[in-house]
Image: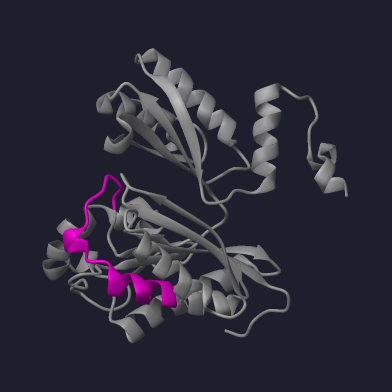
């Protein structure tokens, strides 16, 4: 596609490696080597065995960087040797494109679909399309596409046409699996660690707070065990930060955890979040009647 004047796209690929700093650095370096792209953040977790690289730039440059990241991951990561508590389908597991400035969702969808075709045509890695870029209604939700993960889907795709990738296949790549590529609005990846180590209790908390079970609007959640920290975690994606702030998620997790004899140990932000989400969290936490960016010194300079 032709770059739109002043357009900025964010890309937040998730890679199935969170333990080997050399691999993580190599992938991020290949992304950052693309002109007109800036790597903004790298977040790795050894229990998830997963890294999230946040970068942004001009649309065509972001597309090139996304393909470069998938290429590096496919060279360096073998899913047959990968273990971790987070679900995954590919070495480069999910590659979302997010409109940030002077670009609409339709253009981001077109960009995501072109990246998905390039990953198959250039790298031989099958791709699925999700989010706003999905070609099928049942593939709009990421968790639906990834259901079963690499181990199950590599067998299912051989005999079930409904599981076939959108580009390439039907067999998955023998070591890199398949990459899920899409377009979405900004979301917040936010995790809360709880103790003691009671995985069933953490899963129960996750069930109660997620939107699909009648919980918080725009919230997806998983209960996980973190061996390295000797605790459990409620891992969330806040897909509608305009409706639910990170503090509201924290507060609801704390409330549900206390009912089950768990206590909050710490929380973490994965990657970046919009300024308004931070402001909204302060507003909710401190019960401000009015609080916006106009009350923050740096936003007034």
Residue 84 colored magenta? yes
Q: How many marks?
A: 0
Q: Which sits in the foreground, 254 or 38?
A: 38
Answer with the quarter of the image where residue 224 lies. Answer: top left
Q: Main secondary structure of the magenta part?
A: helix
At x 60% / y 48%, what residue is drawn? 273
In this picture the colour scheme is: one colour
From what the image shows, is residue 236 above or below residue 201?
Answer: below
Vertically, is 77 above or below 141? below
> 49 left or right of 277?
left
Query: Does residue 212 sit above or below 54 in this rendering?
Result: above
Question: Which range is magenta?
Answer: 68-87
User: With 211 as the anchor, is 199 left or right in this view?
Assistant: left
Q: Which quadrant would the N terminus be assigned to in this image?
A: bottom right
| Residue 275 pos. (x, y %) | 68, 46
Q: Is residue 13 visible?
A: yes
In the figure, residue 240 lies in which quadrant?
Answer: top right
Residue drawn at the location 52% of the way across and 31% of the way down: 249
Q: Residue at x 13, y 70 (%)?
A: 158
For residue 76: magenta?
yes
In this orientation, which residue lies closer to the viewer: 29 or 205?
29
> How far from the left and from the top, in percent, is residue 226?
30, 36
Where in the figure is residue 170, as x and y percent of width and height?
20, 74
* Picture quadrant where residue 2 is located: bottom right
The residue sitting at 78% across, 24% down in the picture is 289
- Pick whichever, 65 or 255, lies toward us: 65
| Outermost residue, right side | 301
Q: Is residue 153 visible?
A: no
Q: In the rendered view, does 259 fall on the left or right side of 112?
A: left
* Residue 233 coordinates in the image, percent (x, y): 36, 33
């Amino acid at each position: 596609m032709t770059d739109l004047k002043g357009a900025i796209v964010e890309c937040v690929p998730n890679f199935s490696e969170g333990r080997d700093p050399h691999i993580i650095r190599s992938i991020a370096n290949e992304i950052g080597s693309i002109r007109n792209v800036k790597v903004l953040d790298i977040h790795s977790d050894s229990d998830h065995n997963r890294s999230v690289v946040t970068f942004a730039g001009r649309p065509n440059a972001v597309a090139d960087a996304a393909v470069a990241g998938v290429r590096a991951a496919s060279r360096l990561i073998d899913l047959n040797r990968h273990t971790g508590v987070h679900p995954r389908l590919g070495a480069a597991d999910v590659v979302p494109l997010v409109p940030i400035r002077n670009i609409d969702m339709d253009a981001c969808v077109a960009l995501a679909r072109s990246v998905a075709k390039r990953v198959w045509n250039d790298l031989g890695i099958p791709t699925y399309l999700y989010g706003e870029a999905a070609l099928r209604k049942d593939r709009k939700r990421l968790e639906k596409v990834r259901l079963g993960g690499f181990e199950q889907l590599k067998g299912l795709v051989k005999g079930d046409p409904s599981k076939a990738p959108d580009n390439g296949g039907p067999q998955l790549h023998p070591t890199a699996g398949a990459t899920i590529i899409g377009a979405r609005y900004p979301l917040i990846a936010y995790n809360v660690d709880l103790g003691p180590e009671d995985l069933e209790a953490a899963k129960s908390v996750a069930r109660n707070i997620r939107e699909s079970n009648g919980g918080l609007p725009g919230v997806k959640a998983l209960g996980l065990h973190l061996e390295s920290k000797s605790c459990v975690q409620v891992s969330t994606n806040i897909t509608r930060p305009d409706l639910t702030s990170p503090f509201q998620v924290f507060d609801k997790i704390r409330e549900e955890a206390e009912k089950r004899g768990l206590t909050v140990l710490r929380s973490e932000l994965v990657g970046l979040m919009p300024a308004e989400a931070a402001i909204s969290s302060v507003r909710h936490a401190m019960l401000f009647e009015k609080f916006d960016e106009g009350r923050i010194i740096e936003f007034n300079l």
